[in-house]
Image (cartoon, grey):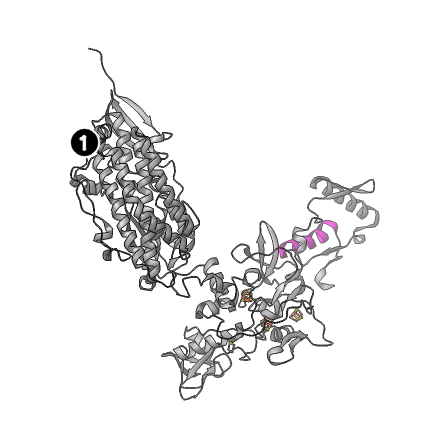
């Protein structure tokens, strides 16, 4: 353990902890943009600059390890001016998109610009040419001119998903996020979920809603047994998006797979089966539950009588609860009388 | 001897002379008023509660809808309260303050003119209405030039004004201040010495100084009873202490004197408007406090930093520091106060209005007990109430 003093507060942190982690321990907020706990820090945005006693120049808190006896100042007029300059430079060619940007209202860039009272007038440049690019996944739309090149998406794709299909292409002023040739995207949406601005947006549902319009219902993904935590964005009783904003929540820590993130359209789909159907004269007709279940029971009985219990097999689903799966195997074993029971997760 | 029985009569809520949906339950002994109980709430919209669900900026529009004959003054009182809460009173640009005074006084004259016309009409002097509404229309047109709206401008904003006044406003205002005094003379010609008018108003609805103070009555009703109490003098805001004007008062506090006081107030307001026009400084009309006031609209179309500031302020609103504040202004009807409690969020935790009309109305029975039914109309008119503010 080492001792660090942040803005006059002394804290003890394990060796190897960064200045930012020490500040968090001390309950002091340092503004960040490119930092994300689950990703390796790369110190690309320089919002988190702090002064360290004995250092001639400010250092970035997110990727500088704290040293024993270090004395750190996180807020001063000079630091604030440096942060303002960082923001001004980020705004140099940022489009006037907030009113039409999906991220408006929950955008880290907006929050920081508002907090620091920055205007862009100090620096100007030609606007970025906006051609609608084809991103690596059809579920995600890319807006390169809104990108702040924080590199979160690149790191998330590589470090969390182990895919690494995107990278920063070109350099300097012309850099953008582009594909890595030959590596295929798995459309997991990890990059989408970590982007602090509106440079990557969800393109599944045409309806969009501001954060204060749609209700965010925290729930558990129904697709498999992992039980990932996610939020259904519900507008007027209809699911329009899935988000993950809590990166500290087990078991998935804000990550999802393609099914959890983008595979929710069935919820409101008009073809979704909501009532039992029974085939009569070659055509599926709506029936009551009693009628449908009666038919199933009768047919199962017939099969069992004619061919024996082992002629029947049961396949259960990871989308059911444990209780339902328990009941199902019980039903197969005790009622039907067969051990032919399996589960989709074993396929 | 046959027995007599008091009769209960409902005056209102649909009665042209109750100035809105007011119901007064009258207990009458023949034609004499025994009791008069105002029943309120027909126009209750839950305005104060509603304001607690709005950001500070959004809540402004609700203030227009209280006393809609003095909307700009309602706006002003509210904005002053929020500015006090935020501690930005010193940052309001001078031009905004002078324009605020100018608009508020014009609004006061318009409010008094509306009162004059309808009050006279209630008592049977119809001609006055046409005269008063002619000048009121001129003011409303001017206010429309500036604010874009006739009755509900929401024009005074936290930090200043929504926009600067166009040049045409200053021309019109100059002409108007020249013209109005002679117009007030005309109204006086029609009423002040008019025998019928005096018979209907003199000695009617008297309320003494002491009673006024007990009832917390404010505004022209209080001043007509002889109390020299005007917040613009005793608790000045917007630099009223630097303007030269008098506070007209009466002596007996009857319906007639309330009439005289309001007429004299119009003449004083004109003096204030004139002085405001003379000293109108150049400069911005909105303070520049990035976390609170919106940036100039032109910059929002050009500068992403300003666009973000605008977006954040308009969608989420600013956070006010924890605490509470009371701020009151002299509205056309009396002391209009706002008590705001902030829990540190973007919305007022409590939004409470001290309404002059609501409080002045409480003395109605005191004023008309033992008088004739017809006097009820004269007295209600002389109180100058607006139900939008009473019921809120
Ligand atoms: S990314 Fe943020 S700042 Fe940029 S347009 Fe979208 S909401 Fe506005
Ligand atoms: S969707 Fe997943 S695999 Fe594709 S680029 Fe984003 S993070 Fe990488
Ligand atoms: S796309 Fe988003 S996450 Fe990726 S670099 Fe740009 S701003 Fe950062
Ligand atoms: S948060 Fe440290 S450099 Fe971006």
Q: Is residue B361 shown to the viewer in this render?
A: no
| Residue A15: x %, y % from top left | 47, 84
| Residue B38: x %, y % from top left | 30, 33
The verdict on label 1 being within 8 Å of ligand 1 is: no
Q: Is residue A268 shown to the viewer in this render?
A: yes
Q: Nearer the viewer, residue A295 or B289?
A: B289
| Residue B26: x %, y % from top left | 28, 27
| Residue B295: x %, y % from top left | 44, 63
Answer above or below: position of B217 versus B302. above
Does the magenta run of residues contain B236?
A: no
| Residue for badge 1 | B203
Q: Quadrant of ligand 1?
A: bottom right
Whether residue A291 sits left or right of residue B374 in the image: it is right
The residue depicted at 72 percent of the width and 52 percent of the height is A332
Label 1 chain ID: B
Answer above or below: position of B330 versus A137. above
- Quarter holding the N terminus of chain A? bottom left
Q: Nearer the viewer, residue B11 or A344?
A: B11
Q: Which residues are magenta?
A: A320-336
Whether residue B188 sits left or right of residue A197 in the image: it is left
Does the magenta run of residues contain A335?
A: yes
Image quadrant of residue B99? bottom left
Image quadrant of residue A210? bottom right
């Amino acid at each position: 353990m080492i001792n660090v003093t942040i803005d006059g507060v002394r804290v003890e942190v394990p060796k190897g902890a960064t200045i930012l982690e020490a500040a968090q321990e001390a309950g002091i907020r340092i503004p960040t943009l490119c930092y994300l706990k689950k990703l390796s820090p790369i110190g690309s945005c320089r919002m988190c600059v702090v002064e360290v006693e004995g250092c001639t120049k400010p250092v970035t808190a997110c990727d500088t390890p704290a040293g024993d006896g270090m004395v750190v100042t996180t807020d001063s007029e000079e630091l604030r001016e440096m942060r303002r300059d960082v923001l001004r430079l980020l705004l140099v060619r940022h489009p006037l998109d907030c009113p039409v940007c999906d991220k408006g209202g929950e955008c880290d860039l907006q929050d920081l610009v508002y907090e620091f009272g920055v205007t862009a007038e100090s620096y100007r440049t030609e606007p970025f040419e906006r051609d609608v690019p084809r991103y690596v996944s059809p579920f995600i739309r890319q807006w390169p001119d809104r990108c702040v090149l924080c590199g979160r998406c690149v790191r998330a794709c590589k470090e969390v998903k182990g895919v690494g299909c995107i990278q920063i292409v070109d350099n300097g002023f012309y850099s953008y996020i582009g594909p890595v040739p030959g590596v295929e995207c798995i459309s997991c949406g990890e990059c989408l979920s970590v982007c602090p601005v509106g440079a990557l947006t969800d393109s599944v549902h045409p309806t969009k809603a501001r954060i204060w319009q749609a209700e965010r219902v925290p729930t558990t993904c129904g697709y498999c047994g992992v039980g990932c935590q996610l939020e259904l964005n519900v507008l007027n009783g209809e699911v329009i998006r899935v988000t993950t904003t809590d990166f500290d929540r087990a078991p998935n820590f804000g990550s999802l797979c393609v099914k959890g993130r983008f595979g929710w359209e069935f919820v409101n789909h008009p073809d979704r089966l909501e009532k039992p159907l029974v085939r009569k004269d070659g055509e599926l007709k709506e029936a009551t539950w009693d009628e449908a279940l009666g038919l199933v029971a009768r047919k199962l009985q017939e099969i069992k009588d004619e061919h024996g219990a082992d002629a029947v097999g049961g396949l259960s689903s990871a989308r059911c609860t444990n209780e339902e799966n328990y009941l199902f195997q019980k039903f197969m074993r005790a009622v039907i009388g067969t051990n032919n029971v399996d589960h989709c997760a074993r396929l | 001897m046959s027995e007599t029985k008091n009769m209960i009569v409902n005056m209102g809520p649909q009665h042209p002379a109750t100035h809105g949906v007011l119901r007064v339950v009258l207990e009458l002994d023949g034609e004499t008023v025994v009791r008069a109980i105002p029943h309120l709430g027909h126009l209750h919209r839950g305005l104060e509660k509603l304001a607690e669900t709005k950001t500070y900026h959004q809540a402004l529009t609700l203030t227009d809808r209280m006393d809609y004959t003095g909307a700009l003054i309602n706006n002003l009182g509210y904005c002053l309260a929020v500015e006090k809460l935020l501690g930005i009173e010193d940052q309001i640009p001078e031009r905004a303050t002078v324009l605020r005074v100018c608009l508020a006084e014009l609004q006061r004259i318009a409010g008094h003119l509306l009162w004059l016309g309808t009050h006279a009409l209630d008592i049977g002097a119809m001609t006055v209405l046409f005269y008063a509404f002619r000048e009121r229309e001129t003011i409303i047109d001017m206010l429309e030039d500036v604010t874009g709206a006739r009755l509900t401008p929401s024009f005074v904003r936290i930090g200043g004004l929504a926009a600067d006044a166009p040049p045409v406003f200053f021309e019109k205002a100059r002409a108007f201040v020249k013209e109005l005094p002679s117009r007030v003379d005309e109204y006086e010609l029609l009423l002040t010495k008019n025998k019928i008018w005096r018979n209907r108003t003199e000695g009617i609805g008297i309320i003494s100084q002491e009673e006024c103070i007990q009832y917390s009555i404010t505004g022209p009703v209080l001043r007509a009873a002889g109390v020299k109490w005007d917040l613009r003098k005793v608790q000045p805001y917007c630099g009223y202490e630097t303007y030269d004007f008098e506070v007209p008062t009466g002596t007996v506090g009857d319906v007639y004197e309330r009439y005289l006081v309001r007429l004299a107030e119009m003449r004083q307001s004109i003096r204030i408007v004139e002085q405001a026009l003379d000293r109108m400084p150049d400069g911005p009309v909105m303070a520049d406090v990035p976390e609170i006031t919106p940036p100039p609209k032109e910059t929002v179309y050009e500068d992403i930093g300003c666009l973000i500031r605008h977006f954040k302020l308009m969608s989420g609103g600013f956070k006010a520091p924890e605490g509470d504040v009371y701020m009151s202004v002299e509205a056309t009807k009396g002391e209009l106060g706002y008590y705001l409690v902030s829990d540190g969020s973007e919305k007022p935790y409590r939004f409470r209005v001290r309404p002059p009309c609501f409080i002045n109305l409480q003395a109605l029975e005191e004023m008309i007990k033992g008088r004739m039914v017809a006097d009820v109309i004269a007295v209600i008119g002389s109180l100058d109430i607006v139900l939008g503010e009473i019921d809120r």
